[in-house]
Amino acid sequence: MNHILDAEGMEREWLEELFNRTDNFAANKKSLLNKQQGKIVATIFYEPSTRTRFSFEAAIGHLGATNVSSEAAGAFSSAKKGESIEDTIQTMDGYVDAIVMRHGDDDSAHRAAKVSAVPIINAGSGSTHHPTQALLDMYTIQQLLGQIDGAKIAFGGDLVMGRTANTLAKAIASMYKGITMYGINPEGKGFDEDVINYIKKQGAWFREVEDFRQLPKDLDIIYQTRPQEERYTDGQAVPRVLAINNDVMTHFGDSTYIMHPLPRVEGERSEIHKEVDCDPRAKYFQQSNNGFLVRTTLIDQILER
């Protein structure tokens, strides 16, 4: 069964096939139109989402499949009455052909997969896993650089609770060669040691820095994230996030691209100032648009098996 649960479960051969199929779909959107008519896909989101939920549901609609959805499942499903993830999944897999799920617990997708009779697609679990975001991120990096082998990537923002950065770092380190990674860590609150150890064990080079200007000027990618304030309990300090503005961008060359999984914080506290949106190196909206392409191709691949 083709579950999509975490970065560690991905293989490069499978990834390259997915990206080739995504390229074909991007070149001809009609190629997958209504291809999965008669199939039913559930989207169960226990946490808020804009890009992930809408891109998945747009993908399901484009494929001609039926979508059954719970946008705030914690409040508007039987989870409100105390139902477990396992009971919900074993109920839903009697109705549908695949389940897309987002949940606040780190182990939620793995718990679901253990009892599910249909594929589980993890749309974000806790602070640790967001595999489909990593897929679209890697697809975007490949578009920008031509290849991912040998890439130099820096991760900024909230690296403690940021599941997108954690997942992408692990995925790239495990599948590509000659990778150089930096963690931007101004307060001693960067990637957890287990993430750093995993990255190094896969053969990637890793270093922590305290400021953007300590990064090489020929860096390929800066992957910025917002402070995950909703994941810090009372009394826990939210890490300070260094912002990217036009002044920061003067440090880097023309081929240093800025990515961000979005959403970003609005206003003066934003981790990417809106002035950067006009910079041709800002690629986060291209990245977001790729979510529809990659997730459509992914669901089609899963449903045809």
Image (spheres, helix red, strand yellow):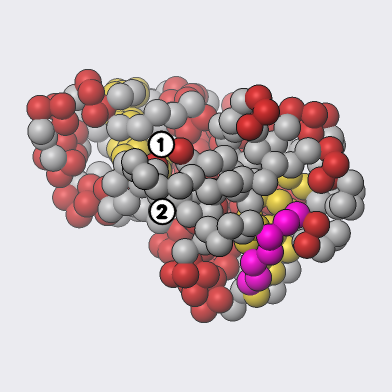
- Where residue 274 appears, as percent x and y from the top left, is 74, 28
Q: Name the residue under label 2.
A: 128
Residue range highlighted in magenta: 206-212
| Nearest to viewer (mark 2 / mark 1) | 1
Q: Is residue 35 left or right of residue 246?
A: left
Comparing 49 with 4, the one in front is 49
Residue positioned 69% across, 36% down in the render: 272
- What is the number of the mark on residue 90? none
* Amino acid carrying mark 2 in the image: Thr
Q: In the structure shown, which secondary structural element does the residue marked by tag 1 occupy?
A: helix
Residue positioned 58% across, 57% down in the render: 187
Q: Mark 1 points at which residue?
A: 230
Q: Which residue lies furthest to the front in this view?
A: 235
Whether pointer 2 and pointer 1 mark residues with C-beta atoms closer than 8 Å, the reply is no
Comparing 46 with 33, the one in front is 46
* Amino acid carrying mark 1 in the image: Glu
> Which quarter of the figure has residue 43?
top left
Residue positioned 85% across, 41% down in the render: 247
* Sequence order check, earlier mark of 2 and 1: 2
Give the quadrant of the N terminus: bottom left
